[in-house]
Image: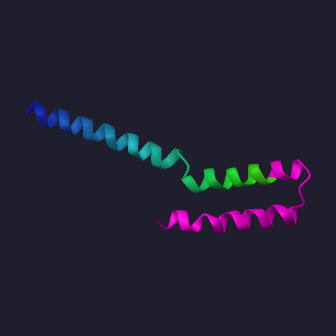
Amino acid sequence: MAAEIQDSRSARFALRCSNWAERWFPDSWVFAALAVLLVCIGALAMGAKPTDTAKAFGDGFWSLIPFTMQ
């Protein structure tokens, strides 16, 4: 009986932690989008042209495809 209560308490605690994380912790897409914006702003601040920045991003993205498809 005591083991069932302990499992139940730990299961409820785990579910509460999981629900909190799902609600308040952003998806990885948010971190990726913020990183792209930060790098883009940094490149523009250093004097790069917007078209050069976009081209470099596109070239770099497609060069990563073989790595991600391993």
> For residue 46: magenta?
yes
Above or below — where is 7 with respect to 48?
above
Q: Which quarter of the figure is the N terminus placed in?
A: top left
- 12 and 49: which one is in front? 49
Q: Which residues are magenta?
A: 41-70
Q: Is residue 65 left or right of residue 51?
A: left
**Residue placed at 13% from the left, 37% from the top?**
4
Q: Identify the image's colour scheme: rainbow, by chain, secondary structure or one colour.
A: rainbow
Above or below — where is 53 with respect to 24?
below
- 12 and 41: which one is in front? 41
- Horizontal and vertical percent position of residue 27: 54, 53
**Residue placed at 49% from the left, 68% from the top?**
69
- Horizontal and vertical percent position of residue 5: 16, 34
Q: Is residue 26 left or right of residue 34?
A: left
**Which quadrant of the structure image shows residue 61?**
bottom right
**Residue placed at 83% from the left, 51% from the top?**
43
Above or below — where is 16 with respect to 31?
above
Q: Residue furthest top?
A: 2
Total labels drawn: 0
Q: Kindly report the secondary structure that dominates the magenta region of the rendered protein.
A: helix
> For residue 31: magenta?
no
**Which quadrant of the structure image shows residue 18?**
top left
- Horizontal and vertical percent position of residue 15: 34, 44
**Residue placed at 19% from the left, 37% from the top?**
7
